[in-house]
């Protein structure tokens, strides 16, 4: 059994070192489209975990514009393995960080800065948890084979990362733990049990251009056709099934004296449940074909094309994830901390691996403002931050839960 008081004392003593590691990471710009920054962060991460006995493998991304994925391994004496998942990249370019003076800044109980919450705070948590296990549960730490994975490009489309993980999971992997930020409901700390899937799409209408003065009736107006389609696309949204479609952008036409020959809309579709997700995508695809807008002169019709640009499948509620969450809830009880689970609309790498090995998400510390770098004078807009006082309790929950998961107590 772990001694809770000793555990907390140790974590409090290690916190300054953990925050120093976080400060170093936040100081390295690792925007997805800054591969040299992403690769530099991977090296710093490797060095930090080397003291715990981890060795590195760098895996090229399938996409030439992105940095390398990072895999760290520490082989254990037993046959069980636990995987931990984080990512290297952030959504903030160096220019944006400079423009908004968005850098490491400690203010009261908050640390502001790019990635403090999504997800460098999660990487810091991984280190703190493993360091604590090494000291307070050495039997577990030495017995388990630890595999740590960092996606170089989680913030964009990176389907290759799921394959990188699946190919490297040990045969007896008892859990994949994703260190995205926790949710909060009052005092309750929320783990992530499911995430929506997401399809991005483009609808292109091809009409027939014509002179808006001389041959107006000869034109098949693609913009008008798109206008007819938009309410149909929007109507695929069904809140009762948690299916949403967002029309993100619309464009069309070129100049004012020309009946538009082309118009397009792009957007995304999300759902938790695989069948609902599929039916939404099918409804969207069914809009393709001959349009109902045409040329009054000869009946030439607009043509509608529907493309699915990217897909990340849903991570639905499932028994293996729920079982893991029960362990975290139990650990919380022993620490007098309320822990629960929730389903989240945003994607994570959990979507790619939940059916390969039992997966739980939300192991990172709590914060807010993710993907925001701006601050308003009246305080109504604050950039991304992590809460300092929440780090030690969350680390204690994670340590206790992992020890239970590994059969220690
Ligand atoms: Zn993230």
Image (tube, helix red, strand yellow):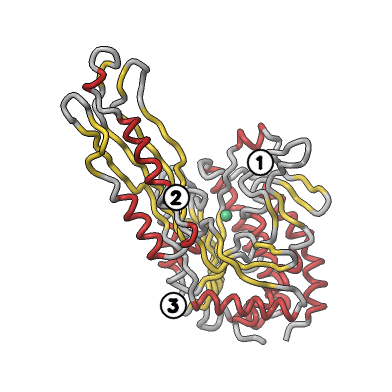
Q: Look at the picture and state if 374 lies above or below 41.
A: above
Neighbourhood count class around disc 2 (C-alpha, 10 Å): few under 14, some 14–19, many 20 upward: many
Q: Quadrant of ligand 1?
A: bottom right
Q: Report how far apart the C-alphas of labels 2 and 3 lie in the structure.
A: 38 Å
The disc, 2 or 3, on the residue closer to the chain's N-terminal end is 3
Left or right, 19 with reference to 212? right
Q: Which residue is mark 1?
A: 373
The image position of residue 396, as x and y in percent, is 73, 72
Q: Secondary structure at mark 3?
A: loop
The image position of residue 286, as x and y in percent, is 28, 50
Q: Residue furthest left?
A: 298
Q: Which residue is mark 2?
A: 245
Q: Nearer the viewer, mark 2 or mark 3?
A: 2
Task: Identify the residue shown where x is 77% and y is 69%.
Answer: 11
The image position of residue 191, as x and y in percent, is 62, 68
Along the line of sight, the residue nearer the viewer: 230 or 9:
230
* Ligand 1 closer than 8 Å to label 1 CB: no
Left or right, 225 with reference to 381? left
Q: Report if residue 268 is visible in the image.
A: yes
Along the line of sight, the residue nearer the viewer: 266 or 212:
212
């Amino acid at each position: 059994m772990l001694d809770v008081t000793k555990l907390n004392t140790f974590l409090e003593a290690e916190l300054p070192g953990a925050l120093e590691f976080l400060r170093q990471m936040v100081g390295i710009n690792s925007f997805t489209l800054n591969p040299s920054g992403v690769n530099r962060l991977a090296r710093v991460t490797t060095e930090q975990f080397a003291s715990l006995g981890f060795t590195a493998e760098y895996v090229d991304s399938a996409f030439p514009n992105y940095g390398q994925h990072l895999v760290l391994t520490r082989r254990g004496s037993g046959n069980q393995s636990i995987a931990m998942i984080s990512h290297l990249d952030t959504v903030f370019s160096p220019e944006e960080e400079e423009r908004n003076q968005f850098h490491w800044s400690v203010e009261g109980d908050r640390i502001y800065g790019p990635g403090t919450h999504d997800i460098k705070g999660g990487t810091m948590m991984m280190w703190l948890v493993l360091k604590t296990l090494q000291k307070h549960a050495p039997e577990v730490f030495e017995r388990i084979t630890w595999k740590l994975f960092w996606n170089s490009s989680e913030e964009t489309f990176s389907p290759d990362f799921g394959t990188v993980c699946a190919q490297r999971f040990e045969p007896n992997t008892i859990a994949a733990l994703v260190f995205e930020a926790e949710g909060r409901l009052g005092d309750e700390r929320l783990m992530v049990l499911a995430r929506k899937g997401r399809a991005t799409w483009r609808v292109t209408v091809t009409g027939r251009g014509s002179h808006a003065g001389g041959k107006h009736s000869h034109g098949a107006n693609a913009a008008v056709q798109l206008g007819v389609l938009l309410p149909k696309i929007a109507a695929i949204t069904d809140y009762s099934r948690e299916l949403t479609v967002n029309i993100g952008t619309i464009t069309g036409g070129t100049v004012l004296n020309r009946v538009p020959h082309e118009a397009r809309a792009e957007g995304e579709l999300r759902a938790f449940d695989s069948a609902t997700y599929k039916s939404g995508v099918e409804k969207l695809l069914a809009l393709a074909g001959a349009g109902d807008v045409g040329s009054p002169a000869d009946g030439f019709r607009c043509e509608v094309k529907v493309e699915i640009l990217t897909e990340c499948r849903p991570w639905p509620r499932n028994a293996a994830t729920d079982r893991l969450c029960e362990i975290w809830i139990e650990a919380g009880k022993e620490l007098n901390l309320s822990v629960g689970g929730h389903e989240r609309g945003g994607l994570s790498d959990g979507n790619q691996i939940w059916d390969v090995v039992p997966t739980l998400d939300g192991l990172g510390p709590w914060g807010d403002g993710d993907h925001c770098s701006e601050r308003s004078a009246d305080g109504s807009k604050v950039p991304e931050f992590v809460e300092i006082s929440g780090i030690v309790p969350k680390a204690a929950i994670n340590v206790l839960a992992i020890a239970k998961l590994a059969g220690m107590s």
